[in-house]
Image: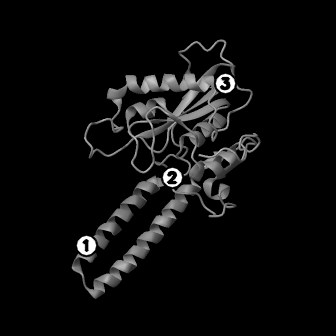
Amino acid sequence: MKDCFVSFKTTIAGVELPFQLNNPFGKEIPEIAQIAVKELQQYIAANEECWSHDFGFGTSVKQAVKGKMFGVLVVENVKGEMGYLATFSGKLMNDLANNHFVPSVFDATVDDNFISTGMKALSVMSREIKALELMENATDADAVAELKLKRKNKSYQLQEQLFANYHFTNRQGLTQNLLDIFCDTPNKRPAAGTGECAAPKLLEYAMQNKLKPIAITEFWWGRSPKVLHRQHKANYPACQNKCRHLLEYMLHDFTLFDATCSR
């Protein structure tokens, strides 16, 4: 596993450290985490030309919004040195991200690249459905319905296989996949995209590399999407839909999750 530990460039002598990890769903952001955020934002801005990803800073109103949530986790290593980890929610394909940030918990290239193979199969089905729909006759309508059901089942199976390959460790050292972690929730399964948010990626990396979590926060970088207002550089709590149950599993020995904290 690559070394993603980032040493502080800012002098942090005299900065008061929290006695325990702050609530990822709360509004309080420890000073040490604010320093890490400032350094990461400076790094992103300074290396703007290296990003192949478009964060939506263009002037065109038709431009697709592609802002991202980033996260930092201040940690202490086994030598007693303070530093931080950085990552982003979801995927971000470019060399800069691969060299600087904590990677996804799941390596998509394993198991014969089943995600890529499965997505290609779904694309083929979608093209076949579109071609049949253009023919507009009763026989083709039955074939379309059959293909749509086949595509739906294939998509579900692919999602289940993906969840089974996302493994997370809690503070007691127990490792489970997402299907096991969410089996006791009302929906019995995680929402699509669970496991790719910043907070669980950062915490999993810390646990796997014997790094003590000190403080955590997330911030938005880029233009705001239309469906959910986000302010550039502003801090936000971890999401409820995908992260609440997962982080409670990972950190359940911490008294972090009081009922008054909501997104």
Q: Residues within 10 Å of mark 3 (few under 14, many from 20)?
A: some
**Residue 224 sits above or below residue 120 on the image:** above
Q: Is residue 166 visible?
A: no
First-in-chain label (3 vs 2): 3
| Amino acid type shown at disc 3 | Glu
Residue drawn at (47%, 48%), measured in percent from left and top? Answer: 108
The image quarter containing residue 232 is top left
Disc marking residue 131: 1
SS assignment at label 2: loop
Q: Report the Cα–Cα distance between label 3 and label 2.
A: 29 Å
Q: Residues within 10 Å of mark 2 (few under 14, many from 20)?
A: few
**Residue 181 sits above or below residue 43 on the image:** below
Query: Residue beneath label 2, please?
Result: 193
Left or right relative to 125: residue 24 = right
First-in-chain label (1 vs 2): 1
Decide which of 245, 34 is in the foreground and name it.
34
First-in-chain label (3 vs 1): 3
Disc marking residue 76: 3
| Amino acid type shown at disc 2 | Gly
Residue 47 image position (x, y, % from top left): 37, 25
Q: Is residue 197 visible?
A: yes
Residue 60 image position (x, y, % from top left): 25, 41
SS assignment at label 1: helix
Left or right relative to 90: residue 28 = right
Residue drawn at (56%, 30%), measured in percent from left and top? Answer: 85
Residue 214 image position (x, y, % from top left): 67, 28
